[in-house]
Structures are given as C-alpha cells and as structure tokens.
Image (tube, helix red, strand yellow):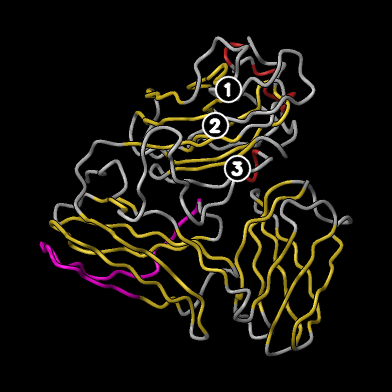
C-alpha cells in the first residue's frame, strides 16, 4: 500500500513563509517537558515562545553530545518540545524567530533561538526522556530575530530539508532560547505534493449523545472512503468508523459522524482519507472537550504523588481507576463519587512507581468512561 506522504489540503489555513505565518488554530504550545511533548502534524504553522520554559532535560542533552555536535551544549536553559511522526524519509520546514527577543541573564544580548530534531534509537523512535542515548538529525545553532544587531548568524526565517528519517517513526522537535533568551517563534511544515481531497473544514463539538464531527470537501479525486480515528493523546490512534467518499467530484460535499463513546473528556480526532488504489493521507488533528457537557477529568499530568479528579456526573457510585504500566503491572484504586460536580484527590505515593501508565476510569457497571495516558515522576 502506498502511503501518500503528506496530509491533504486544509484551505482554511492560509500561510506564507516569513513573519506573516499564521498559527494553526487549536493546537497546544510546545511542552516544557520532553515526556509530554504535544503531537503535531506535518502541515500548518505552529507557534510558541521560550519565555516561560525551563531547563528541563538540559543536563541530558549536554551529556548526549547531540546538540550541534556539542558546540552549544551548555546553553540549553529554556527548551520546549513538540513530537511528530515522519511520513517519509525527509521533512521540509521553515522556522522563524520574530522581532522582539529579549535578553534573559545572558552575556551577549538578545540573540534568538536554537533547535534540534532528535529521537531515540528504538524501533518507533520513542524512549524515556531524560535518560539514555538519542540520535540527532538536525541542529540549528542560532537563528536570531531581525532586530538582533550583535548577531552574525541567520536572521528572521530559515528553511531546511531534513533527510535520513524513517516513515512511521516518531521524532522530537526541541526549540530553546539562545543563552536563555525570551523569543517568539513559528515552525511551518511544507510540501509540494498534489493532494487528492480539498478539505475546507473539519470540526467537532461535544453533545449529550456524544462527540459530533463535521467536515466538508471542495473537491475529491479517487476518494474511496474516510476512516475516522480517535486518540486520547494525539499519538496513539484507533479507527472508530468508516464513511464512504464521493469518488470524483468538484462539488461541495458535507460529512458528519457522532462518536457515541468518546475515549476521554478531551478526545483527539483525525481523518484518514483512502483512495481507490489504497493510497492514504491524514487530515489535521482536532480535539473535542466535553468538560462543559458532563465529564470526568484527571490532572495534573505529569503528576508526583497526588492526582485530582474533577468530575461532573449524573450518577454517583463507586468508580475504579485501573493503572496499566508499560511493563504489564496493574494497580487499581476505587473512589466513591457523588452525583454532581466536585473535586476528589487520590494519593499514590505508596504503591505507584515512576513511569508511564494507561489509565482507565470505570463506573460500577464496568463501563469505561475515560482512557488516558498519565506520567508519574
């Protein structure tokens, strides 16, 4: 099966190279922690800043010798992280540092940002952030804003093509303020592939019956069907339904689907568009937040010893939290929740070791109400 390597067109997103880049709506900013890096797709423009980031995992990068061949390895002070899944052996992007960087306890003035694309030497490219070896694929030593008078490195925007990737593997995109500078930045992924479906909208909203998804196409070519995929973390996906496409058409077509059993309070969705010959491509990711429609949410994530359950439920009772570790260990906690909206706290300092867990929340009937990935320090 051929995998059409880049996502199909999203015409509501109008972008251009340079400072007029428009950020993709609905996507989270980069995470201060590598372990909780938000997943992004290889289209659109993603914006962030280095102002509030800290030096998480900085010592790990320093010892890895992967940051620009260790030349600037000791200047990682306020780094943020994204994660993406490669769809081909290369990826093209443009990264920009906007005007207005401010100096933050450094020596040579407001200098801009630096960046690194890396992953772990594992089958899927994922690993334990903060420990172990990593592989570096691209390193930007310094990209200054156009108002940086003392900098000789590239200013404004820089386009790059990164080769040597493996389709299907995950890669991290780290952005750091040079010597701790506070800077706004944007990253735009680009492609020159002709795409089979012109997707002009893809939206969702929480309703009493479930999460209602809507999408529209301006034209379709050889469009066999759409797979609707769901995720609790925007990384691990499952197909929840398929809807037949319209084959070949130049007319506006509207689609909708109701997910009657959302996986979590905040559920991510994407469309997998499949051609008659089996070629496929993915839409941008959206999410539906059911917190206003009756919900149960768990936070913070990552957590240390205590978890909070924020709930708004129509039926009280004994609820079970099942924690499944990556090594197959299972731990359960039960809590008596009352009808209505409230906040409950659970202490895990006694029997839950550090690591990643897939967590299920079930009611007395065994119905799973939420499925989410949590990280314990």
Residue under the point 12% across and 62% down: 250
In the picture as drawn, the residue positioned furthest to the right comes out as 350
> Secondary structure under badge 1?
loop
Q: For label 1, count other residues whose C-alpha is less than 10 Å away and answer few (under 14), some (14-19) or many (20+).
A: some
Closest to the camera, between mark 3 and mark 1, is 1
**Is residue 204 rendered to the left or right of residue 217?**
right
Q: On the rendered structure, is 311 left or right of 216?
A: right
Mark found first going from the N terminus, 3 or 1: 3
Residue 16 location in percent, x, y? Answer: 36, 38
Please, is residue 201 above or below residue 102 in the view? below
Q: Is residue 165 magenta?
A: no
**Residue numbers of the magenta segment:** 235-256
The residue identified by callout 1 is: 147
SS category of the residue bearing label 2: loop
Cα distance, mark 3 to mark 1? 24 Å
Q: Where does label 2 land, which residue?
A: 98
Question: In this figure, which residue is indicated by the disc labeled 3?
Answer: 30
Judge the density around disc 3: few (<14), some (14-19), many (≥20) Cα neighbours within 10 Å. Answer: many
Position of residue 44 relative to residue 346, above or below, is: above
Residue at 44% across / 62% down in the picture? 269
Q: Please tell me whether mark 3 sits on a helix, a strand or a loop.
A: loop
Q: Earlier in the sequence, mark 2 or mark 1?
A: 2
- Eye-nearest disc, 2 or 1: 1
Say which of 5 and 111 sits in front: 111
Q: State the image coordinates of residue 13 (x, y, percent, origin top left).
A: 36, 51
């Amino acid at each position: 099966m051929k995998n059409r390597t880049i996502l199909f067109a999203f015409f509501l997103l109008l972008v251009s190279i340079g400072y007029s880049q428009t950020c993709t709506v609905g996507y989270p900013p980069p995470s201060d922690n590598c372990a909780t890096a938000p997943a992004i797709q290889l289209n659109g423009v993603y914006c962030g800043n280095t102002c509030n980031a800290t030096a998480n995992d900085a010592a790990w990068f320093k010892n890895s010798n992967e940051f620009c061949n260790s030349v600037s390895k000791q200047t990682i002070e306020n780094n943020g992280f994204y994660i993406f899944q490669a769809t081909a052996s290369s990826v093209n992007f443009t990264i920009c540092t906007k005007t207005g960087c401010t100096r933050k306890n450094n020596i040579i003035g407001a200098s801009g940002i630096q960046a690194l694309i890396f992953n772990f030497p594992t089958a899927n490219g994922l690993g334990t952030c903060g420990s172990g070896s990593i592989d570096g694929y691209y390193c930007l030593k310094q990209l200054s804003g156009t108002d940086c008078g003392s900098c000789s490195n590239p200013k404004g925007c820089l386009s790059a093509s990164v080769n040597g990737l493996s389709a299907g593997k995950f890669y991290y995109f780290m952005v750091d303020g040079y010597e701790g500078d506070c800077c706004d930045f944007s990253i735009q992924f680009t492609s020159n592939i002709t795409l089979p479906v012109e997707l002009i909208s893809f939206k969702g909203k929480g309703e009493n019956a479930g999460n209602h998804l809507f999408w529209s196409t301006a034209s379709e070519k050889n469009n066999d069907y759409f797979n609707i995929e769901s995720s609790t973390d925007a990384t691990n996906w499952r197909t929840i339904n398929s809807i037949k496409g319209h084959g070949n058409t130049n007319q506006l077509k509207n689609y909708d689907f109701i997910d009657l059993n959302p996986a979590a309070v905040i559920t991510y969705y994407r469309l997998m568009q499949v051609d008659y010959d089996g070629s496929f491509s993915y839409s941008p990711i959206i999410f539906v937040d059911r917190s206003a429609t009756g919900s149960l949410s768990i936070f913070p994530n990552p957590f240390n010893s205590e978890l909070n359950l924020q709930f708004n439920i129509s039926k009280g009772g004994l609820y079970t939290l099942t924690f499944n570790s990556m090594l197959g260990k299972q731990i359960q906690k039960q809590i008596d929740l009352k009808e209505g909206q409230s906040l409950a706290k659970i202490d895990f300092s006694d029997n839950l070791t550090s690591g990643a867990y897939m967590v299920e929340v079930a009611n007395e009937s065994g119905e799973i109400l939420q499925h989410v990935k949590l990280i314990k320090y």
